[in-house]
Image (tube, rainbow, N blue to C red):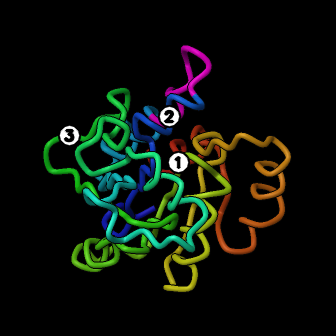
Amino acid sequence: MKASNKALLVMDIQEGIAQRYANSADFFTPFQQAIKAAREANIPVIYVRIAFRDGYPEVSAKNKMFSAISQNGGFTETASSTQIHAAVAPEHGDAVVIKRRVSAFSGSDLDVVLRAQQIDTLILMGIATSGVVLSTVREAADRDYSLVVLSDACIDADPEVQRVLMEKVFPRQADVMSVRDWVARILL
């Protein structure tokens, strides 16, 4: 694998989301392994986080998911809930993209960052599989990116949804593999 046209997307692994899922001491291990391997292979690591402006001007009352956030407060750009979790913290030089919707592309400058670096292949991992990962796979495929989904570095609250996405949905548009298999492939 040629590293120069690839990027690892670390999506929504932020304080307010990860705390809902982190139920074991080794929860962050697959994410950390993928990030470490990407860095060793000189693959850019790009962080994507969801956050809103104060006052939520980008949230419509028609959006069921986000209107509840705007009514209850939180998830603003400066809130601790929207900061990248310390277990997978960005390093100097890593791009951090703020998005305003579920997909990593919607309401963000991700595509600009990727095009500027001539990235054409995305390696995806994040929380939740049925949210940011699914939406980003679909949109990235429509934008003609080649895709890899790291199956054990994608987390969903529903094991059946996770299984169906990994075994039936994602393989139509992406290569699905474990972090271990991906690391072995890029570090050859």
**Residue type, numbered disc 1:** Gly
Q: Could you say which is closer to the camera, residue 83 or residue 64? A: 64
Residue drawn at the location 85% of the way across and 46% of the way down:
160
Q: CA distance from mark 1 to mark 3?
A: 18 Å
Residue 185 image point, x, y percent? 54, 50
Q: Residue 18: which numbered mark, if any?
A: 2
The answer for how far apart the CA atoms under marks 2 and 1 are is: 9 Å
Helix, strand or loop status at disc 2: helix
Residue type for callout 3: Glu
Left or right of 89 on screen, residue 34: right
User: Dot 2, crowdedness within 10 Å: few (<14), some or many (≥20)?
Assistant: many
Choose top left, top right, bottom left or bottom right for residue 64. bottom right
Q: Position of residue 146 (x, y in %)?
A: 53, 74
Q: Secondary structure at mark 1?
A: strand
Residue count near mark 1 (Cα–Cα under 10 Å), binned few <14, some 14–19, many ≥20? many
x, y percent for residue 53: 27, 60
The structure residue drawn at horizontal position 46% and vertical position 33%, both measured from the top left corner, is: 33
Q: Quadrant of residue 95?
A: bottom left
| Image quadrant where residue 5 sits | bottom left
Residue 70: in magenta span: no
- Return the mark for residue 91: 3
The structure residue drawn at horizontal position 31% and vertical position 40%, both measured from the top left corner, is: 83
Distance in Å between CA atoms under marks 3 and 2: 19 Å
Above or below — where is 18 with respect to 160? above
Judge by depth and name the residue closer to the eye, 35 or 95: 95
Q: Earlier in the sequence, mark 3 or mark 2?
A: 2
On the image, numbered disc 1 is attached to which residue? 126
Looking at the image, how many numbered discs can be counted on the residues?
A: 3
Q: Is residue 116 above or below residue 15?
A: below
Circle 3 crowding by C-alpha within 10 Å: few under 14, some 14–19, many from 20: few
The residue stretch that appears in magenta: 22-31
